[in-house]
Image (cartoon, rainbow, N blue to C red):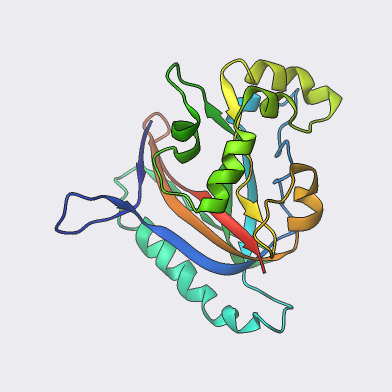
Amino acid sequence: MSGNVTILKGDTDDITELVLSGIFNLDWQGFFMGPKGGFLPKNAFSCDFVDTKLTCNLLAVQHDVVYASTQCDFPSIISNIRALEKLVPLKKGESLLSSVCESHGMPCIRLSHALFIKKEDDDDLDNITCIGMCLPHHQILHSLMCVSEDATMAWPVQDNNREALNHAALTHYISPLPAFDIDGKPIQPVDYQQVLSGAVIQAQFTLLHYFIKGNRKSIFTTSLHEMHIL
């Protein structure tokens, strides 16, 4: 499997990730951004907890007077993402799995966030926090508080997921959802489901591309940079 991240190219040697941003509704259906995501200890696909992604659908704002005007921008966002995905041509026999899907019969963007980051022998808090990208100051502070052995072991999971968390903690740290309330304060993991599901948010995310050679499948997904409740 090979992978790419969408970047901006220019005349300099600096490489900048292309970060997409917009105002959206978080769909309450298909919302798997609770502390355990959609992980089940006895799942049919035998996925490890460390592979868990927190996911949800981004919809056009529907019932908010203040941000209803952003509905006009949503079709352009969808069109732009599809245009970016078409920049990777498909060869004969290959198929595409788009980051754009449908919910309630309407187009939406599938947003994801990796719940774990892998430990390295030379890890220090600065390296763990930044992970190769520049983060806003409040998000750096949030990560510094959360990236540790103790924070990983204290992650709120049900008893039937505790063994999976203990196993994951041997090689990985928890990577909290970079989600913030209207005052810029981090939303606590126990509140992810209640506070975020159905909320109007501003999200910033990167478009990622992977190619699975065995299945001859071109896969586009997203990686959340941060979200703020509006």
Residue at far left of view: 11
Number of numbered discs visible in the structure rendering: 0
Rendering coords of residue 189 (x, y %): 74, 43
Is 18 left, or right, of 97 in this rendering? left
Residue at far right of view: 159
Rendering coords of residue 83 (x, y %): 37, 64
Residue 220 seen in the current view? yes
Residue at image position (30%, 57%) is 87
Q: Is residue 3 above or below residue 164?
A: below
Rendering coords of residue 19 (x, y %): 42, 58
Observer-nearest of 119 and 42: 119
Rendering coords of residue 71 (x, y %): 59, 79
Is 22 left, or right, of 9 in this rendering? right
Residue at image position (29%, 46%) is 91
Name which quarter of the figure residue 151 lies in: top right
Is 51 left, or right, of 97 in this rendering? right
* Image quarter in which the N terminus is found: top left
Name which quarter of the figure residue 65 lies in: bottom right
Name which quarter of the figure residue 215 lies in: top left
Residue 47 seen in the current view? no
